[in-house]
Image (spheres, coloured by chain):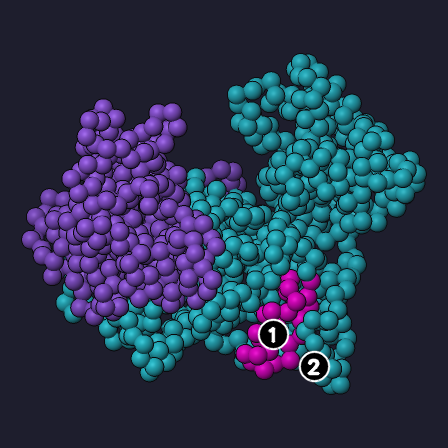
Amino acid sequence: MELAEEELGEHHLDEKEVVDVVVRFAGDSGDGMQLTGSNFTQATALYGNDLSTFPDFPAEIRAPIGATFGVSAFQIYFGAEDVTTAGDELDVLVAMNPAALVTNIHNLVEGGLVIVDSGAFTAKNLAKAKYASNPLEDGSLARYRVLDIDISKQVLSAVEPFGLGHKAALRCKNMWTLGLVMWLFDRDRAPTVESLKAKFASKPEIAEANIAALNAGHAYGDTAELPVGIHVYKVPKAKVAPGTYRNITGTTALAWGLIAGSELADIDMLFASYPITPASNLLHELANRKQFRVNTFQAEDEIAAVCAAMGASFAGSLGVTSSAGPGIALKAEGMALGAASELPLVIVNTQRGGPSTGLPTKTEQSDLNMALYGRHGDTPIPVIASSTPADCFDVAIEAVRIAIKYMTPVMLLSDGYLANAAEPWKIPDSEKFEPFPVQHYADPAGFKPSIRNQDTLARVWAKPGTPGMEHRIGGIERSFDTGDISYDPANHQKMTDLRHDKVKGIANDIPEQEVCLGSGSGKLVVVGWGSTFGAIHQAVKRARREGLDVSHVHVRYLSPLPRNLGDLLRGFDQVLVPEMNTGQFVRLLRSEYLIPADGLNKVAGQPFKIGEILAAIHQKISNQGVDTDQLGASREVAS
Amino acid sequence: MNQAIPALTLKDFASDQEVRWCPGCGDYAILKTIQKLMPDLNRPRENQVFVSGIGCSSRFPYYMNTFGFHTIHGRAPAVATGVKLANEELDVWVITGDGDGFSIGGNHMLHVLRRNVDLQILLFNNEIYGLTKGQYSPTSQPGTRSPSSPEGSIDAPLSPCEVALGAGGTFIARSIDTEAKHLSAVVKASHAHKGTGFVEILQNCPIYNDGVFEQVKDKKLAQDFRVEAVHGEPLLFGKEKEKAISLNRDTLALEVIESANNADRILVHDETNRVLAQLLAAMSGPDFPVAVGVLYSKAKSTFTADTEAHLQQVRRSSGNLKDLLHSGHTWQVK
């Protein structure tokens, strides 16, 4: 259905106490906005709000100063209730220069607060942002509350005692701004002070200057005469389950999940990868974790990475490879060898905007078809997807478990949003994880590489170095009985069926699909997979608050699908499937279950807004009645 | 490995699979030589792993009663690197051909060589694509008539040994399919070498490129068209060893001279001399003999051993999952 957006009636800094707030720090790539954002996040977590963050940075590594395409931003949504997205519209925008203002102001809610560094609004910078006149002077910001401060000047005087050069002194601007925003929301500066001391341990004068800037920004809020309506806002603490928490990005959670998987499987892991945005951070994280049973190999290309991973699996370790769409395409032949030779392998796809190079730093869910079908031959492999940054941890363990238990490649779908977004995570008790130790086959009596587990249909895993286990495998079709090369027609039928049945059988080994919000039947179910979880969850929650009969189902297992999914969805009058693609999952649901599911599709490089999904829910529910329902069902998925 | 290794014979290394190369194929001779060599290496059979890509030569692992992985076209070096990274104890062999190793898999060949992964690469070079029925390969001589080059190929060929040296290979050798004794010795030396042992084997394809190495292989002709490089020995050839290889110091090029009365000008092979190895690898007919033997061998730390050392260093204190999950900034909610 058509993508529309709904204004969400919220408190927009009109009261001294607000339920939730969206703040976006935006500046030049060199302005340190990511550092500012992460420090604010830490302080907010400590304060006790629930939160979700999303860094949004340009593809260019060092864009020219002041350029609109060089704007780097960090968005945080925090509040007193459960927060599952980085937020729709902004309540507060921090714009360090005209380029940051012009690229972000349209996301600021009417009446929202914009904090600008007027010192950066020079004729040169205004021209780079293509402003004909200075927006701070021409009245074009009249709809917003504007706090324009010559931050550069403030910072220079604040850090003067530390004797830094002009350029180095100006680098403290972000901390000054952070100090002001911390004042605005009553955040504690102590953890930021500690992290600055640690970060600049070898340059104490830089640390002290940054701390002075932070304190000066905070003091400015306290003492300066600010425009009416700008004051300290209280955001009540969220009610969250007791426990120990940390912030975690999808990438870190995925890396740690892989580590946990190898520990639970009691097996060494080789993570073989080739750098590609936005997947590289997974390689970086694991390269720092070799004290665990993981080794990393930066291969010469994507194909070598999947092949080296498979070599490791053949040798008895678990091979894992990782990439984004274009790289996954290159790995397709290797994955098919993994399926043919029946070796465990985990392939992580951190999806990004496509086709081709597409939008490397932006998010999308458009590789689902490739994950499900993108190999030559009849080559089914299990596909699972993580739905939130923290969920990446559990899904990674699950991918390892399935790969080993069923001797098959497993595709794990993440995306650019999940990879970089962060959320508080209640740290699980690692001692309560259920181990699934690998037992390599070692009995020489009657050994054949084709011996199978009758339940899972998995082939035995016999590793080199084990006496009596010598055997050959490969990509040529093998005899079901002996494992030797076979061109026999009936055998190929049998092996093709076997590969299919093996993956299909995994459905008996995964949980039945649950409804994550709402009831097991009703008027409308919103079905999602992957990173749309947060936006769908909030939209369904709000719709239910309005009294609408709508539920949320979020699918982790995309192949095979949970056994009960078809029956579950048939219990609803209407099925709506929001996806960041042109309708790949909705087509799967339609073809698999012959149900009139309708798609809601967005490919803008940005996650769904809550308001976009809520608008679609409203349209669905208000359009009820037999005739329109039928119409809706027959409409093309992609409009 | 303190366990005694049971005495094995050629038969212990032959699998039960029927060998399916064309009658007269040079691959038969190579297979026999390797199967015969295996017991001499004095390594447990279960530690031998043969990895291949796609092509006639890549069927080789099916015929060895060892571990074998017949993978995808050109990617055997990458798979083999993964095998060796997973278990350094294994003896890993890559079996490849001129198309598999230097056309579709050229990239992996460069990188396995520059990393100096501790494994052996046996490149069966028949200067033609056999399995796809006779198209020219990246080592085919210009003018090779084939189904895809009916008027003769236009491409300039590459020289595998030269490329291997250029990629930073630390052990470069050349031998001949039917010269069992020579081939066996060269492969044995490559196995003893720590690092990537690269062996180009000139191999006859009787169906699509028959006789392409005739001058080098034929007992009589070879005397004039083949020179054996032996470390520390003068580079002599000819029926009566009447010819020798010499370096023209003005042009920095090799030349063929008469060996008589020229003792001071005759080059003595030094397998540690990379420049000499490059010159010898490049020699080809009709003006020069083809050099066989160990052209280059230089000790250098290997990727696999360095990786292992690095891991041991990092793992002096092993990781604790609970500590990892709680590392960095955490907070309590009561």
Q: Chain of mark 1?
A: A
Residue highlighted by disc 1: A587
Taking the magenta stretch, the answer to whether it contains residue B252 is no
Read off the residue under disc 2. A634
Answer above or below: position of A627 versus A328. below
Q: Are marks 1 and 2 on the same chain?
A: yes
Residue type pointed to by label 2: Ser
Q: Quadrant of the C terminus of chain A?
A: bottom right
Q: On the rendered structure, is A420 left or right of B204?
A: right
- Magenta residues, start to end: A578-602
Check the image and report above or below for A602 versus A274. Answer: below
Host chain of mark 2:
A
Please name the amino acid that badge 1 sits on: Arg
- Residue at 74%, 20% in the rendered image: A156
Residue A131 in the image: x percent, y percent? 86, 40
**Which of the pair A306/A584 is nearer the observer?**
A306
